[in-house]
Amino acid sequence: MSVLYAREGDVQALKAAIAAQLVNSQLDFSPITDAQSKASNPFGNNNIAYVSQNGTALTEPNAIATLIGGAALVPAAVETAVHSWMEWEASKLRPATYQQGSALQDALQHLEQACGAKQQLAGSVMTLADVVVYSTLLPLHQQGSLPAAVSKYMSGIAGSPAVSEAQTKVLKGDAALVKSVFTADAAAYTAGLPKLPVPGQRNILITSALPYVNNVPHLGNIIGCVLSADCYARFCRARGYNTVYVCGTDEYGTATETKAMEEGMTPQQICDKYHAIHSDIYKWFDIAFDKFGRTPSRWQTHICQSIFHSLEAKECLVEQSMEQLYSEALGKFLADRFVVGTCPKCKYEDARGDQCDSCGNLLNPTELINPKCKFSGTKPVIRSTKHIFLDLPKLSPALQDYITNTSQLGGWSSNCVQVTNAWMRDGLKNRCITRDLKWGTPVPREGFEDKVFYVWFDAPIGYISITANYTPEWEQWWKNPQDVEMVQFMGKDNVPFHTVIFPATLLGTGEPWTMMRNISVTEYLNYEGGKFSKSRGTGVFGSDAKDTGIPVEVWRFYLLSNRPEQSDTDFKWSDLAAKTNSELLANLGNFMNRSLSFVSKFFEGKVPAPTSKGAEAVAELGKAVGPKVEEYLASMEKVKLREGIRLAMSISADGNKFLQDTKPWVLFKEDVQHCASIVAAAVGLARLLAALVQPYMPSFTAKLLQQLNLPDSAANLTDELVKGSFQPQTLIPAGHAIGTPAPLVSQIPEELIEQLRARYGGNQAERDAKAAAAAAAPAGKPAAAGKGAAKAPAASGGDKKGGEKKEKGAGGEKKEKPAGGEAGAEKKEKGEKKEKGEKKAGGDKKEAAAEGPVDVSKLDIRVGFIRKAWRHPDADSLYVEEIDVGEAAPRQVVSGLVKYIPEPEMQQRLVCVLCNLKPANMRGVQSQAMVLAATSTDGATVELVEPPAGCSPGERVSFEGFSGEPEEVLNPKKKIFETVQPDLSTGDDLVARYKGVAFMTSKGPCKVKSVKGASIK
């Protein structure tokens, strides 16, 4: 017998049951909540499954009814009409019943006109048209919400014995059950619909720079665009804003053709390969796009060419001949990236024809010194070719007005404003928007059949086309400036295309486009003192992060807390471990475990009711936390993501201090009611922190909510939650039963970090070769680098054997210690030491840096920027300086330079800073680093060692031939600096040197003004 699997009360299952009754077909109805276990559609979203006697399986309600009813319910005389009504029901009526509103009114009006005096929709007998329409409208009919004519029609169909029998079988005569199932289905349907702007609400459109598909994204790419945008999008959704986040792979252009040639594939094949890689990596990183698409699409061609035609109609395009490099060996014009040579600006010898990787300047390939073809190695010749240019000089006045107004309104970052203003100040020139390529959007103009649009004209339009692939009503997002705010995320090298080229393109059409309001720009994330490079395969890549075994929440936390917002930052394995162990584990993880363990241990797993006892301490906690939550919201609104996570961790530290000060483990023995107030506030603060860190670590929050036994909605940043942050004891109701507490973070051991640093020391291609060699090696051979590594910390979440550990405290008191190595819950009441979370990660273990020769590589010398300097309050010969060295907060440094350098000359300047000296107290002021200066041989002149202009604070000064890892902190007993210092001096060219090797930065060597042969210290 054929079987219908479905939920009781599902009116879509009723269709098959009515059809079976009408044709006297045997059909067994099997109530089940998981129909997909019996048969599944390609989307995995069916609630109905039909399996016939011969094994045929169907999941679509109308298809099932058609198979069962056959020709008897689709008479030949009215076959066209029946199929027309069934298609209308599936595409119009059914969605309208879920959506309600105007869509339902239009559908019912259409049906009302068709019903009239007829009892059936097609012909004189009941057909499948009546079966499907009746079943879909039944929930509304039972609620009495249909027009009179439609209601009369429904009553007529309901009078059929076959219909009555089917309803008894599937619906059980339970109108409440029908309503419940219908309401759930409507909610699921509407949740899956594309979001559209809602007038009167805050509608935010977020875009992330489209990553090229020419390689695997590295950590710099990930934090520079998709991860930062995801963090902000999650915050916006948590605040209840109507938010859409779109991104996708940028697949057209030279980079794709180049990669395809390198790998022996077609451009389409290379795009398919790397789009899948990108998608998998972003999925692992918990990036919650509303749409992650691709630039090659019909919408891309349509919108790009439409914009072109609009610019053409507005006379914003000019056609010109231009000189372009041509490869006689290959017999074709060379795309910009197919040409390499020496940069005319900075003399970097491996600059590309479109942009220099060293100085970042945009180039034309004809500007390169000693150009050569990337593939043949031959010198190209210059030939004339015809191209189309965007008339930027004509668009400049409107563009300048847009920049002036929007940069102030949107609060553009200083680095973004500086880059944009430099472009405008130098005067805009016509910009070529076509290229002699095959892989791209075709240019719709006669004579340009062999050309495509230049990727930087075409790519930003990808934001629009990807939105169009998300919803056909894309213009509600992109041509709705009065209702939509657009926020864009990117690295600093993409700024001019988004603040100059793309806005000028949209303005030139004269159409009401939604223009970017706010832009979040990152500087560069460097790797262990060097540079990431996707095109060169150097650094840690997204797939590498997954392969380390370190949980995703750790990666997200580290990258976002180290986000290069104002200056370049450095990825270091040792720093990843330190931040994980000292902040995630000893601070946040420790507080969560302590708070929940107190509920479980002292109050049988139920949140206690706060009382008047302990109210003063709880109120003080609220006074500390509430303002920080408001500051957190303000920072996140301004897209200051590093500040947001810093504030969240500060609130967690407040929680730890609160527990340490109030000592609930002691109070429980002395005054349970007082203890109840403390524990209620702590667990309420845990819920608050779950919401604050959710944009940064959604997987961490999900596990915490599970332990708190709270729904996902508990992490929404509602106004009610913000208000409750001033009274944390109110955030979880008394009597609420929590889940099982367990450690949420595990320690990253020092030996693992050493192995990871060694494993990822080479570039990606080298690592792939090693992995392949290791895989091919016969059994018993030594493993490749990284094999036999220390076990990576798993994402904690389950109970460990033995539950909570106990250890003796002061005076014989037992004190609680969470499992999994997290910091202990309490300290000794007398002679207390700092908590583990306040110690440097790794405890008493040796420094992570491997032992090696004592040379300048042991010194962590960085570019610093003196924000301000002032006289030491208690020492006439000393300055105190506030210096930015690329960290979250500036360092305070004390220098004995008053005799040699006037105070005005100490302000707002670049210097070289030794950052890994042990902090020292100098006349009551702590000095956290040392400014390097050169002293003449007679001691009369002292000059600061100065990095070249354009260097970013935090950049590590390098020394060719000395590439070791610096010590975390120089051990005074080893006298490393004292050993190295005698070889630090200035040369006759005024360049600072170590053993003759220059102090080098990305912008050139560091120098002094005048002293030669001077000692540097």
Image (spheres, rainbow, N blue to C red):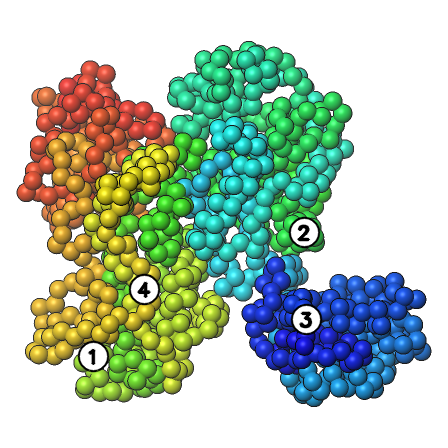
Using residue 210 as the reference point, say whether residue 543 is left or right of it: left
Q: Quadrant of residue 627?
A: bottom left
Distance between the alpha carbons at the discs numbered 4 and 1: 25 Å
Counting residues from the N terminus, which is met first, the one under dot 3 or under dot 2? 3
| Front-most of residues 662 and 33 | 33
User: Which percent across, then down, holds residue 924?
Assistant: 13, 50
Q: Is residue 581 above or below residue 152?
A: above
Residue 197: x %, y % from top left:
64, 58
Secondary element at tag 2: loop
Residue 665: mark: 1
Residue at figure coordinates x 66%, y 26% from the top left? 451
Q: Which residue is tagged 3?
A: 52
Image-quadrant location for residue 887: top left
Above or below for 339 versus 778:
above
Left-right relation of 91 to 362: right
Q: Nearer the viewer, mark 1 or mark 3?
A: 3
Classify mark 1: residues with Cα within 10 Å, few (<14), some (14-19) or many (20+).
Answer: many
Query: At label 3, which amino acid type do we have?
Result: Ser
Mark 1 vs mark 3: which is more N-terminal? 3
